[in-house]
Amino acid sequence: MARGVESVRRTALGVFGALVLMVGVALLVLPGPGLLLVLAGMVLLARAVPALDRFVAPVRVRAMRAAEESVSSGWRIAGSVLVGVFLVAAGVVWGLVPGLPYSGWATGASLIVSGLVLFTLLVWSRRRVQAARGDESDAAD
């Protein structure tokens, strides 16, 4: 019985990991946190298929570098906040204005969620960079 549960768990992790990975790959060319989602998908897939674990470390390095670069200057942070505000506002407009293509709250909610995810990842990246800088300054003292 335990073996069946483990098989179902691994299958679910594999399917969910593959979906997250595909969304991450799409977001590499679309606006969004593509590398972080690719990393999340790879981690989930590696839990389902241990042979894939060797691919996680290189993706983690690139994703963390991209996260750090996204908050490396005030201009980048301001641009990201502006994009997030635009996504949330566009989501509200798409939800309220019936004449727009694909109008409705399904499209509007997806835009709003995208903006909120952007804000969340921006805050997470900023805190991560600040914590790393704090650790570096503590080591220098």
Image: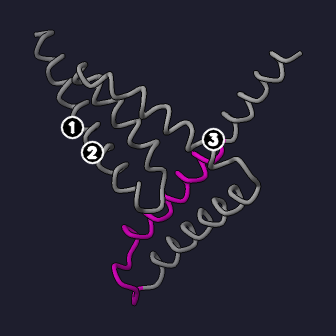
At label 3, the amino acid type is Glu
Q: Are marks 1 and 2 in contact (CB under 8 Å)?
A: yes
Badge 1 amino acid: Val
Closer mark to the observer between disc 1 and disc 3 = 3
Picture quarter with the N terminus: top left
Quarter of the image containing the C terminus? top right
Q: Is residue 126 left or right of residue 1?
A: right
Q: Which residues are magenta?
A: 98-125
Residue, x 45% and y 77% (percent of image)? 94
Q: In the picture provided, is 54 more to the left or to the right than 51?
A: right
Q: Residues within 10 Å of mark 2 (few under 14, many from 20)?
A: some
Number of numbered markers? 3
The secondary structure type at the circle numbered 3 is helix
Task: Name the residue beneath numbered marker 2.
Answer: 19
Residue 15: mark in rendering: 1
Question: What is the distance, in whole Å, between disc 3 and disc 2 at their CAs?
Answer: 25 Å
Task: Identify the disc placed on residue 63.
Answer: none
Q: Could you tell me the amino acid type at mark 2?
A: Leu
Residue designated by label 3: 68
